[in-house]
Amino acid sequence: AELDTLDIIVLTAILLGTFAYFTKGKLWGVTKDPYANSFTNANGSKAGKTRNIAEKLEESGKNCIIFYGSQTGTAEDYASRLAKEGKSRFGLDTMVADLEDYDYENLDAIPNDKVVMFVLATYGEGEPTDNAVDFYEFLTAEEVSFSGDNDPPLDNLNYVAFGLGNNTYEHYNVIVKRIDAALQKAGAHRIGEAGEGDDGAGTMEEDFLAWKDPMWTALQQKMGLEEREAVYEPVFGIVQREGLTKDDPEVYLGEPNKMHLDGTPKGPFNAHNPYIAPISKSYELFSVKDRNCLHLEVDISGSNLTYQTGDHIAVWPTNPGEEVNRFLNVLDLADKRDDVISVKALEPTAKVPFPTPTTYDAIVRYHMEICAPVSRQFIATLSAFAPDEEVRAEMTKLGGDKDYFHKKINLNHLNIGRVLEIFGKGQKWSNIPFSAMIEGLNKLQPRYYSISSSSLEQPKSISITAVVESQMLPGREDPFQGVATNYLLALKQKQNGDPNPTPFGLSYDIMGPRNKFDGIHLPVHVRHSNFKLPSDPSKPVIMIGPGTGVAPFRGFVRERKKQAENGVPVGKTILFFGCRRSTEDFMYKEEWEEAKAALGDKFEMVLAFSREGSKKVYVQHRLKERAVEINELLEKKAYFYVCGDAANMAREVNTVLGQILSEQRGITEAKAEEIVKNMRATNQYQEDVW
Ligand code: FAD
């Protein structure tokens, strides 16, 4: 193939990059492929890049940088959308940046003709996302020291802020609030409001859309920007690699990085580098018409992964074949699915979110979140590429009318492939540049599961307890099926003798790229959590875990059983468990009996079956019935744990606990709530909810 100017630029960049690698003494990631992107290596860092933001903006000629603090990809997605919109509507020179990739003492060196945007998710119990921890700690420290001596230090800094949170959690959107306050305190100037999106109310997308328009107006005034007709400008170039076929060894077929491609995956295994773990055991805990519950164990003895009881395991799923086919068909890419392509960033600050050269099939199957909810803004963007005028008009309406969009798309859980299929009336959307899909769709995210084994009992094996639900919706014929849960179900079926499993009619590429997963391996990594048993085993514990919320408590109970067997004195251990019926979805029934045998009256299970009596009984009702004992245990400094449904159960348990304390201690409800808050602040009350 002939080299065009762009290739020469890319080549030069790679040569420079290579030089930087060698000078740093790091060899990892050096590639001979002139088209290959500088894909993030296994540790997430890129060699030879400055960590000074001011310097970066200066050298790249950008005047708007959008930082994201993202855990599940949504904040990152919003950041790219702001970057695109800023560029296409207002001619800003934008770049998106991972907070982890920069240092912050130079924030004061950013000149006041530029703007910095922060898109920050609040995670778990009011924590910053993993990639934002250093930034958060830097900015909220007692004394923040910036590089220069401006007074106030951030007097030159113009910024914009949007937070992603969930109002069902105690610490709603606290990260954006605290960062906003810290920036103000240091004298920075906010443009527009500090926005807050609420996942709990299910309005995240609409909150974002409603926040950004007034923000753009304010920014336009502040920076004297002129709005222009938005035209789509691709961020990525797609290069057809005529000389390569999918069987060539340098072509990525879904391998997450170079080591996996070369067949020599090495630790550390983490969010950039999964361990392909052998599945040692898998079975169904129960199965009814619309729900299957799985127990699956992976062996981590071949890795350097470790875990502690209460941690999370991340599962890297792949998309079901039927949805991959639908997506490729509707984009008119089905015939090209195995064509080898390279993707290059058309501007130096854009990151290609997967390694190349690769195939369309591998990108869609392994790297793109094609089954997720569709964003209204994306629909508006795609209307420009509609196959005819009528379809364009309908897409414009969907993109512009919030209620219409909700009714037609959200309520039926349509994914992007289905939207294009239905609203394109079966026509192919051959005009959509593939770049628009790479930009517009999230990276396929790992799914987290609360580890249900005890690291004391089995340090080298991790178990997952997951429920596979199938949801009937009014506006579609087939049920809605989750991506990762059905992938796990396919693996379970395979391990139990089905050569070609098709859970609910879905087929997964469980053999993995080049058969590397062999149908019996699962890509995983471990995420450490703060959800932990007291370090003193003699302390009492109260656990509330209905449904799959019981997952970490299986680990807790097994841990205490093991401690008792080792002769360690174990405190009172009460588990509140709830499900529909004792005969239907009561999981781990025999195991609880074994625990009882080992722990004696130290262990007690309190059960709530919601569909057995005339009235629905839930764990929070049972909790209330045991008010006297709960209060006594808490006075003895019992730890209180809640796991499972964040939207309803966890909230109600919190309320009920307040009522119990108020009644038992003869104090006002306000005072009792204060005590509950304090229990949370001191980790006596811990939540693991989703
Ligand atoms: P997905 O495909 O991700 O879908 C999930 C939901 O998103 C759907 O049910 C639907 O409500 C919505 N959705 C998806 N696509 C669309 C669409 N196109 N339109 C509209 N809505 C859509 N689960 C367990 O079973 N056991 C556990 O122990 C457990 N522990 C967890 C611990 C943590 C810390 C967290 C964060 C989550 C935990 N989960 C657990 C939940 C788990 O991570 C997954 O979310 C769950 O298994 C569903 O994954 P999925 O890929 O099958 O579903």
Image: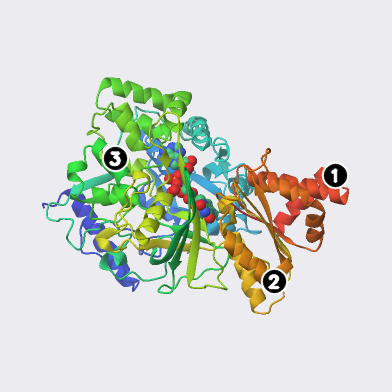
Q: Secondary structure at mark 3?
A: helix
- Residue 47 is situated, as x and y percent measured from the top left of the image, at 36, 64
Residue 217 shows in the view: yes
Q: Secondary structure at mark 2?
A: loop
| Label 1 Cα neighbours within 10 Å, binned few <14 / some 14-19 / many ≥20 | some
- Residue 139 is situated, as x and y percent measured from the top left of the image, at 59, 55
Q: On residue 92, which mark appears?
A: none
Amino acid type at circle 2 is Pro
Q: Residue at x 21, y 42 (%)?
A: 334
Residue, disc 3: 327
Circle 3/circle 2 CB separation < 8 Å: no
Residue, disc 2: 537
Residue 455 or 187: which is nearer the viewer? 455
231 sits to left or right of 305: left
Q: CB at mark 1 closer than 8 A to ligand 1?
A: no
Residue 338 or 227: which is nearer the viewer? 338
Amino acid type at circle 1 is Thr
Sequence-earlier tag: 3 or 2: 3
Residue, disc 1: 668
Q: CB at mark 3 closer than 8 A to ligand 1?
A: no
650 sits to left or right of 381: right
